[in-house]
Structures are given as C-alpha cells and as structure tokens.
C-alpha cells in the first residue's frame, strides 16, 4: 500500500511577509542593538583592561626582579670568606633571604594572575598582533613558577646545610644533602620545563620591549636550568663520593696547562685523595717521574686505539690524556696506579693551576715550605712560567710543583674543616666548574651515569647534532702553550641535499717572545728535521665535527691542505700536524657538510691558560 505524497503550501495574505519581518525586527531589534553595541564597546574595554593589567603586571615583575637581585647579592655576601662575621650574622641573613624569596614569589604570582583570563587569552591568539601578549603571559607564568617552585628548595636548603655544618659537621651536611636530593631533582625538572616553554615564546614581535623581556628571561633560564641540574646531580652523587657510606680514594691529577693535552694539560704532579664521611685527606703526593714508565692494563676500544694508539697513551704517561674524553684519562690513570701499587681507586679528578687560584681566592693564600706565598693572583704565573726560570734543575722544579700542590691542598683542607668558610669554598668550586677547570670520573657505574650528564664529567658527547670542537695537543715537548691564543669561528652556509655547508675557521697565535725564555720551556724534544728557533712550537690540531659531518676541503693560510681523518665517539675528527713559529698566527679553514646544522652547535672548550674565543654565526633558514 502506497501512502499519498502530501504537499503543504503555506500562503498568507498580502503584506503578511512584511508584517512578519516587522515583527521579527520588533522582537529581535533590541538584542541586535545590544549585540552591535557590545561589539563596538568590548574591544576598547578589553584593550583598556589589558593595558591596565599589563602595566600592573610589569610593576609586579620589576618588584620580583628587585627582590631576586637582592637575594642574589645576599647569598653572595654570605658566601664571602669572613668567618667571624658569617657565624655571627648567619641566622639573620638566612631569614632575610627567605623573606626576599617570599616577596619575589608573591609579586610573580600577582603578575601571573593579572595576565590570565579571557581578555589576555583572546589577545594572545590574534594573528600577528597577539605575539607580545603571548610573550608577556609566558614571562609572567615562568617568573611565577621559578619563584614558587624552583628557587625555594635551593634557597631554603643553604641555611640548613650551614646550620648542619656548625652543629654536626660535614657528615651531617652529607646526610642533609642526600635527603634533599628528590627535592632538588623536582626543581631541576621544573626549571628545564620552564626554560623549554620560554624558548617556544615568540622571538620577534611588533613590541620590542616584549622581545627584550623574553631574551632576558631566556638568558637567565639558560644559566639557571643547568645550575639546578648540577645541584640535583651533586646531591645524589656527592655524599657517596665523599665517603658517606664508606671510605673512597681518588687519583687527583694537577694538569700543567703550559703543555696542552686533550683534557687540558700534561698530567704532572698528582695526589691520592681519601674521603671518609666527608673528611678529605691526602695519602700520597708524587709527580710523573714516579709512574712515567708504568703501563695501564686497560682496553678503551678499537676506535680509541685507531685514533691514539701510535702515541701509546696506555704506556706513555705524557700521552695518557690526549683524548678530550676525560673518562678515558680517568681509566688510564687509575689503572696505572693499580699496576704501580696494587691499590684499586674509586675514580679520578683533574684540576689545573687556574682552578687552584680560584679556590685560594676563597680560602686565602697558602704558604710553601720555602716561604713562597701561593695566592689567587700568582698561582698560574708561578707554576706555569716563573718556576721554569727559577729552577734549572728538573728534579728541583718537579719537587716545587709537588710542594705547590701540597700547600694548596692543605689550605683547602683547613677551609673544609672550618664551617664558616664552607659557603665561600662551595662558591669557588662553582666558579671552577663554570670555567670547566675540574673534571670528575667515577669508577662506580651508577654514579658515572649521573655525572656524564653534566659538563664537569668532561665527556665528549656521543649524541647527534651540530658540534664544533678544537683540541690541541703539544707535539714539541715545549711549555709554550702558556703563550697560545686560540679562536674558532663556526659559520653555517647554504643548505644542501644532505644538510648544510659549514665553514669552521681556526686561528692559532704563538705569543712566545723571541728571547728571554728558559731552555726547558723552549726545548724541542720532537727533534724536527727542519730548522727552528727558540719559541717555535708544534701542535697536533684536531677539529671535532658533528655526527655524520663530512669534510669537503681545507686550507692552511689560504693554501689547500690535507688533514688526517679519524673518529671518536661518533664524531669525525680531522687532524693537522702544525708548526707554529714564535710571534706568528696560522689560520686553518675547514669546509664541511653538516647533516644537522639548523641550530647553534655545541662547543667543546679545552681549558688552557688563555680561554678559547668561540664565535657562532647565525644560520639563514632553508627554503621549504
């Protein structure tokens, strides 16, 4: 059965549609007018709201920054080496620091609250015009999280550690530090997240003030995030490495940076350091003549052997740290000591005279047996230059280096035993670490895994990404690297099918004077087949590129040159045997094809007397 199709047609009288329209206008007219009025009024109101709250948020952020600057100054003052004043003023300074932090957190929280809500959210979503609003919102939120979540555990723990040092000594400090490790780890994770969020904020908007604020915030976070991570790692490994759970022993090498090696300088004087419940002592001091002919029973792999085997790093002490990867040196040094004495060590540490100078700035001068004062200002010059002029006898000079190391170490021990000096000493350790003048390796795998994530482990990273490393090894046996200047310019070029072209320009300058230097400083133990003059130097110059990079050409002083290819931990290595006459500069230019040169490279900084001058040029975006 089929139902009939129904068709309904509505017909109205003439004028019905006009009346209906009028009725609709009568009904909806007031709403429409209100909507039009709101559409006209809301944007100015929202703009005024954003303007007022933005001005208020700006003032709150300035107030928070003022409190944080005062807090930083207070912490620096309390770390100064004034023992009696530090003890007397300890409690008030700590109370003032907590008050400053609470004030900064309150201001930052108000700034964050002022930049939230529908008006700010909507403004931040606008194409082009929304950039500054998104940036300001991000700055306020980052400041709130830093002052509320990251800084409190760091600031509040300092008084507890200081009080613990006064009440229970170093063992109590280690216990407190170990208990705070989870808190520091959380703070480090938050700091890293805030840094990443800040980096995602718009970099260039129509409001320069917002761009400057973002740049300043990013710079601060780029410093703070690694520092919080350093603290978190130290809280986990320092107690055990300092003997909280049983005595430890370490090989401590004093590197002579007047003769360059991959990790810094030639390992000369050394000591065996013992830690037990935070107490540090030295069981033995010696120099390279004691262990120069001892062979290390260690296998560092085929790649290491191919790169360094011809120089015998396992059997020649002078070449034991040619690799810039410090764990290699640590394993060789501890293996040498075990072969020499039968004693198994728990790790290795390397420092240099510049780091001793920084530490002596916190502890005060050390006095050597002959009456020589070892100070923050003269340590490098005394041990890396003046000693060679003062002592013509090699044995006397080596004994002087050992005595200098012993005197500085004794001064450190006195400072560690004085709780009032501990903050200043820790501050100096941070300075040494920041300059890359301390390297630490642990023979305990769990500790080493944590250490390897931090720069003070001296690890050559095996991860992919743009990379630029300049490493020099003295090949002449001179002590002329005291006068060596190094510069590196990394310039990305055109995009290629496999990545991007990169030009790395290395300039080396030998400032050694033409006369007046002791023979031991200028003597050439490489006995080159060509004529040289006192002050001429010879270097093995190695450039470490990013994983997957390929060398397309190289020039030395404008002339084509062939480099020796190699590899280490995934990095292509290109080496040149370079004669560097006194009072001269040589320029090596490498042309490379880097697969991931879309961002700034990680720079490997070998620490010598004069720091490396590194310049990274910006990269133009690739089409498509």
Image (tube, helix red, strand yellow):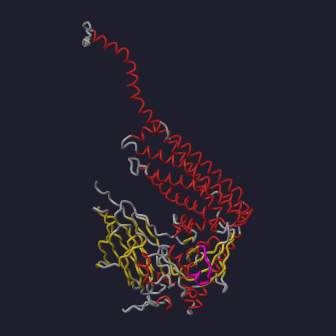
The answer to whether residue 579 is magenta is no
Q: Residue at x 42, y 92 (%)?
A: 527
| Above or below for 130 versus 152 | above
Give 469 or 141, whichever is nearer the viewer: 469
- Left or right of 563: which side holds 379? right
Viewport quadrant of the N terminus: top left
Residue 623: give x, y in percent of width and height.
Answer: 28, 55
Q: Residue at x 37, y 64 (%)?
A: 617
| Residue 609 visible at all | no
Q: Residue at x 31, y 79 (%)?
A: 562
Give 448 or 72, whichever is nearer the viewer: 448
Give 127 or 230, whichever is nearer the viewer: 230
| Residue 166 visible at all | yes
Give 259 or 463, whichever is nearer the viewer: 463
| Above or below for 205 versus 568 | above
| Above or below for 124 versus 539 | above
| Above or below for 227 versus 441 | above
- Left or right of 60: which side holds 74? right
Residue 3: give x, y in percent of width and height.
Answer: 26, 12
Residue 117: give x, y in percent of width and height.
Answer: 49, 37
- Looking at the image, which residue sits at the far front? 1
- Left or right of 582: which side holds 70? right
The answer to whether residue 340 is magenta is yes
Specify start and end residues of the magenta stretch as a single range: 336-346
Residue 276: give x, y in percent of width and height.
Answer: 68, 71
């Amino acid at each position: 059965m089929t139902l009939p199709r129904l068709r309904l047609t509505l017909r109205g009288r003439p004028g019905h549609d006009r009346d209906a329209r009028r009725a609709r206008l009568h009904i909806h007219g007031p709403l429409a007018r209100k909507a039009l009025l709101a559409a006209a009024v809301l944007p100015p109101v929202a703009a005024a709201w954003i303007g007022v709250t933005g001005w208020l948020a700006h003032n709150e952020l300035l107030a928070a920054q003022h409190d944080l600057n005062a807090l930083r100054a207070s912490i620096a003052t309390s770390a100064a080496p004034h023992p009696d004043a530090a003890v007397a003023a300890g409690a008030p300074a700590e109370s003032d620091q907590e008050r400053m932090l609470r004030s900064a957190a309150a201001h930052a929280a108000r700034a964050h609250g002022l930049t939230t809500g529908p008006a700010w959210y909507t403004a931040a979503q606008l194409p082009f015009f929304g950039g500054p609003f998104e940036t300001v919102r991000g700055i306020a939120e980052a400041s709130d999280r830093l002052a509320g979540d990251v800084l409190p555990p760091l600031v509040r723990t300092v008084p507890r550690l200081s009080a613990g040092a006064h009440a229970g000594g170093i063992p109590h400090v280690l216990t407190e530090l170990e208990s705070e490790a989870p808190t520091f780890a959380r703070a480090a994770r938050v700091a890293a997240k805030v840094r990443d969020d800040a980096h995602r904020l718009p970099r260039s908007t129509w409001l320069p003030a917002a761009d400057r604020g973002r740049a300043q915030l990013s710079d601060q976070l780029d410093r703070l995030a690694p520092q919080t991570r350093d603290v978190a790692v130290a809280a986990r490994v320092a107690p055990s490495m300092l003997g909280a759970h049983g005595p430890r022993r370490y090989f401590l090498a004093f590197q002579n940076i007047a003769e360059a090696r991959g990790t810094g300088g030639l390992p000369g004087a050394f000591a065996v350091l013992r830690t037990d419940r935070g107490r540090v002592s030295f069981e033995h001091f010696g120099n390279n003549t004691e262990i120069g002919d001892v062979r290390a029973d260690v296998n560092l792999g085929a790649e290491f052997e191919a790169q360094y085997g011809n120089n015998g790093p396992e059997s020649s002490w002078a070449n034991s740290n040619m690799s810039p990867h410090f764990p290699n040196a640590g394993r060789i040094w501890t293996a040498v000591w075990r072969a020499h004495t039968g004693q198994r060590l728990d790790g290795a540490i390397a420092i240099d005279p510049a780091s001793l100078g920084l530490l002596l700035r916190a502890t005060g001068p050390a006095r050597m047996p002959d009456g020589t004062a070892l100070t923050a200002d003269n340590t490098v010059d005394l041990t890396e230059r003046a000693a060679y002029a003062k002592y013509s006898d090699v044995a006397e000079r080596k004994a002087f280096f050992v005595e200098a190391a012993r005197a500085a170490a004794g001064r450190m021990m006195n400072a560690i035993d004085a709780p009032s000096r501990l903050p200043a000493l820790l501050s100096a350790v941070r300075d040494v670490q920041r300059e890359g003048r301390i390297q630490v390796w642990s023979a305990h795998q769990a500790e080493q895994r944590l250490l390897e994530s931090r720069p003070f482990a001296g690890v050559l990273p095996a991860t992919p990404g743009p990379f630029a490393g300049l490493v020099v090894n003295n090949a002449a046996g001179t002590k002329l690297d005291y006068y060596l200047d190094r510069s590196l310019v990394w310039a990305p070029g055109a995009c290629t099918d496999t990545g991007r072209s990169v030009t790395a320009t290395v300039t080396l300058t030998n400032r050694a004077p033409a006369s007046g230097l002791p023979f031991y400083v200028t003597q050439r133990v490489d006995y080159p087949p060509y004529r040289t003059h006192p002050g001429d130097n010879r270097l093995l110059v190695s450039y470490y590129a990013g994983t997957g990079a390929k060398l397309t050409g190289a020039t030395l002083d404008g002339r084509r040159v062939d480099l020796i290819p190699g590899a280490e931990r995934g990095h292509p290595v290109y080496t040149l045997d370079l004669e560097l006459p006194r009072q001269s500069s040589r320029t090596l230019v490498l042309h490379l094809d880097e697969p991931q040169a879309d961002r700034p490279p990680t720079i490997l900084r070998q620490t010598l007397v004069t720091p490396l001058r590194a310049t990274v040029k910006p990269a133009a975006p690739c089409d498509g």
